[in-house]
Amino acid sequence: MNRKLFISSGIVLMVVGAAAFLAGRLLTGGVSPLGLFTGNGISIVTDILPAAELPKTPPDVEGLFVERQDSIIFIEAGQPTTAPGGSEVGTGGGPKSEIVITADTMVYHDTTEPPSQRPTRDNNPPIRQTVEEGTMDDLNTSQSLVMVWGRKSGDRIIAEVMVYIDLGMPKKR
């Protein structure tokens, strides 16, 4: 009896371990083993060239917009989540950052369009990011990804440049 329990426990442990490994690789965007879950086994990564209006350095902080209090916004780091069926975008679950938007802050809305044709191994041109002047009024809770460049002041970041990307349906004007 003990031998049978030991063998079946070992098999269950191996299956659970393999499932956890595959799930981890899928969630982190890593290449999946044996080309599983990648369609035809070819991974195409398109380069995105930053808009000229944005700083050349990586943003100081980025995350999902969760709240606004006058000229202060709060963003939460982490990946957006969708409900089953893909209908609703949720918060990232990471740490919150307090961002101060001043009269000098340049606010941009990302208007980058996806390529008209699906990239292939032989035809994979870079995409040029495009932005237009935006306003804080267009931020959608848990549906706007925000990137901020600025300077740290205590626990806050004083924004010099902010760009937001609509992840869900755009807000009606």
Image: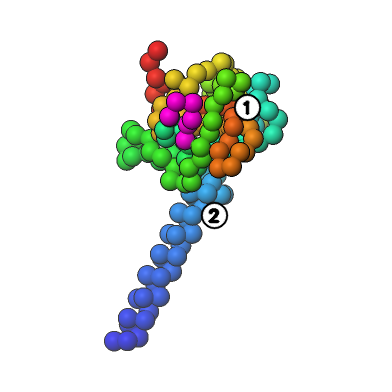
- Residue 114 placement (x, y as % from top left): 54, 24
Answer whether residue 117 is visible to the viewer in this image.
Answer: no
Residue drawn at the location 56% of the way across and 24% of the way down? 102
For residue 10, above or below residue 112: below
Q: Position of residue 82 (x, y in %)?
A: 37, 38
Q: Residue 8, can we see it?
A: yes
Q: Amino acid at mark 1?
A: Glu
The residue labelled by disc 2 is: 33
Q: Which residues are magenta?
A: 69-74
Of 91 and 123, the residue lying toward us: 91
Closer-to-camera residue (41/79): 79
What is the secondary structure assignment of the residue under circle 2? helix
Chain-order first, disc 1 or disc 2: 2
The image position of residue 9, as x and y in percent, is: 36, 75
Q: Nearer the viewer, mark 1 or mark 2?
A: 1
Q: Is residue 112 left or right of residue 51?
A: left
**Overall secondary structure of the magenta section:** strand
Q: Quadrant of residue 133?
A: top right
Quadrant in the picture for the C terminus: top left
Residue drawn at point x = 52 percent, y = 49 percent = 28
Q: Position of residue 65 (x, y in %)?
A: 45, 33
The quadrant of the rendering that contains the N terminus is bottom left
Give amino acid for label 2.
Answer: Pro
Q: CA distance from mark 1 to mark 2?
A: 42 Å
Q: Which residue is mark 1?
A: 160
Disc 1 crowd, CA 10 A, few/some/many (<14, 14-19, 20+) = some
Query: Mark on residue 136?
Result: none
Q: Residues within 10 Å of mark 2 (few under 14, many from 20)?
A: few
Residue nearest the viewer, comparing 16 with 64:
64
